[in-house]
Image: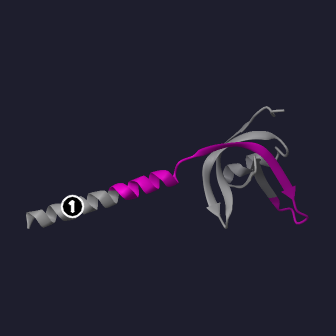
Amino acid sequence: MSHRLFAVLGALAVSLALVAVAVAAETKSETVKGTVSVVKAEDGKVTVSLKAGDVVYGVAGDKAKDLEGMDKKEVEVTGKVEEKDGKKVITVETVKAVEATK
């Protein structure tokens, strides 16, 4: 019976390790450098996006409002990047204005 117990405990340990790795991968922040685009609709809704090369990110999170006054500015945004409905979205943790490269 002790062999069966060790087998079960071993399987449990491996499972927990895999879950820990998956959670760590999900919570990793990235830094994206790009140009802010702010669009204000007639109804007052503000949509902010960040273009980095050929990739356009939607922005989310409480700190996304920090980008609303930075239309057409170059910034570095750090946050968690996810794909939602086939589009990349960054949940903003920090924003830093950078000098535009020419």
Residue at figure coordinates x 75%, y 43% from the top left: 34
- Which quadrant holds the N terminus? bottom left
Residue at figure coordinates x 78%, y 54% from the top left: 48
Name the residue furthest right. 42
Front position in the image: 1 or 93: 1
Q: Position of residue 69 (x, y in %)?
A: 82, 45
Front position in the image: 31 or 61: 31
Q: Would residue 61 be seen by someone viewing this image from the given angle?
A: no
Q: Does the magenta stretch include residue 97?
A: no
Q: Where is residue 32 in the image (x, y as percent from the top left)?
A: 67, 44
Looking at the image, residue 79 lies above or below residue 100: below
Residue at figure coordinates x 82%, y 41% from the top left: 73
Q: Is residue 82 left or right of residue 43?
A: left
- Which quadrant holds the C terminus? top right
Q: Where is residue 74 in the image (x, y as percent from the top left)?
A: 79, 39
Please give the range of residues in magenta.
17-46
Q: Is residue 44 magenta?
A: yes
Q: Is residue 47 left or right of residue 84?
A: right
Disc 1, SS: helix
Q: Quadrant of residue 2?
A: bottom left
Q: Where is residue 87 in the image (x, y as percent from the top left)?
A: 69, 61
Q: Would residue 35 be seen by someone viewing this image from the given angle?
A: yes
Q: Mark 1 points at which residue?
A: 9
Residue at figure coordinates x 26%, y 62% from the top left: 11
- The total number of labels drawn is 1
Circle 1 packing at 10 Å, graded few (<14), some (14-19), many (20+), is few
